[in-house]
Image (tube, rainbow, N blue to C red):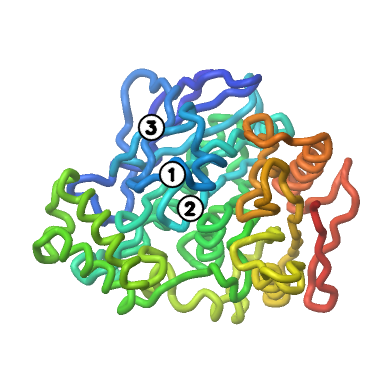
Amino acid sequence: MLVTTKYGRIEGVSWDGCAVFKGIPYAAPPTGDRRFRRPQPPEPWEGVLRADRWGNKSVQFGNPNDTFYKKEFYSNPDFDAPISEDCLYLNVWAPEGEREKLPVAVYVHGGAFMGGAGSNLPFVATELVRRGVIVVTVNYRLGALGFLCHPALSEGRAPCGGNYGLWDQIAALRWVRENIAAFGGDPENVTVFGQSAGAMSLQILAVSRAARGLFHKMILQSGGGYKNPLGVTRTREAAETFADDLIDALGGNEECLRAASSEELLPALEKALAQAFIQRKGMPYVPVIDGELISEDVNELIAQGKCAPVPYILGANGDDLTAAKEDPCPENSPMHRGNIAYAAHTDSHVWVYYFDRKLPGDGAGSFHSAELWYVFGSLDYCWRPTEKHDRELSDRMVTYWTNFMKTGDPNGPGTDLWPRCTAEDPKYITFK
């Protein structure tokens, strides 16, 4: 399948009856003078871009072979990609053949703002495409390269730099608005969805003027909600101490943040990251309240009713990161309570879920990110000995998700009733 975008022609590859366009540049490489700056548009190209390889993923330090998530999401080399500062790429999953005005879903991956990529194993989107949705998965800058904050990095009205990863996500959404019609998508019907740090990012975009008009529906999986315990932002003053760690690791002054070569920068990033964990400073590189993209504490903005006036789905898992160790249930889940509270702070239509399927294969239960296999309908790529019930549950969830992506309401043909969550009637649905 050959398409013509604003920047040039692109040829995708066939994948199980769908067309996949891998590694499309949505911004110029954030390297050299563009390091620690907001993303710039990509340069147009001549000829045809063969989009048959995953784009580079942002600098990150991997998962040791014996970790839980290494086995869960990173064990298949077919879904790996090189690590590079040059990482602003996205992937488009679309039907083969000519289609027009299909709804679009843009997925922002999680990973604690430190790891992950849009090409990770669960994000095989063929099932969503078969249900009539075009899916875009996005890479963005992570760690210090995505969220470092220091006065030396000030740019425009932002006095401290930072939030480059969020500006990347906004740039990707602008690319979608300008180019997705070439793939058969409707730029006026865009759902953004994300999990963990991806959901935290999107909830920030929901209260930021910079992202208004770039999406029309939002799904927040284990990372949204009012006073969500994972919803980390940091003041400028607190964030700047992490930049000091990196400057020390580089053995220079603040000018070295931009002047250091990649060969010098990468070991310094690893050293600074280790120092942050030794000092127990918490998650080292997270969104910062910069006075521009994030004007004040996100929970304050939610309480003021500043959320984008779009429909929302929010959810958490039974054995999520903040779940109660004893008597785990929705009422004892801080994430779930935050999702319920979100509905009370917005006039928009909100649906809340609680995912509590205990996945087969080990004792991890309904762990943080377990729902991804079911939402994407990608259980064929999962190592676990899934059962008929898992396929049926995934089919049910994919139906809800794609109904919502199409119409802004998860209910429709082939579904039972998922009630809205309101301040007066805080209902939710359980998937198990």
Front-lying residue, 118 or 320 = 320
Q: What element carries label 1?
A: loop
Q: Could you say whether the residue bearing mark 2 is in a helix, strand or loop?
A: loop
Residue 111 image label: 2
Pair 1/3: label in front: 1
Q: Which amino acid does label 3 sit on?
A: Tyr
Side of 122 where 406 appears, left or right: right
Where residue 383 sits: x, y (%)? 63, 34
The residue identified by callout 3 is 7
Answer with mark 1 or mark 2, whichever residue precedes in sequence.
2
In the picture provided, is 272 more to the left or to the right than 283?
A: left
Vertical position of residue 355 compared to residue 98: above or below: below
Q: Quadrant of residue 318?
A: bottom right
In the image, 174 versus 316, the foreground residue is 316
- If you read the primary sequence from the N terminus, does the residue marked by circle 1 or circle 3 appear first? 3
Task: Between label 1 and label 2, give the one nearer the viewer.
Answer: 2
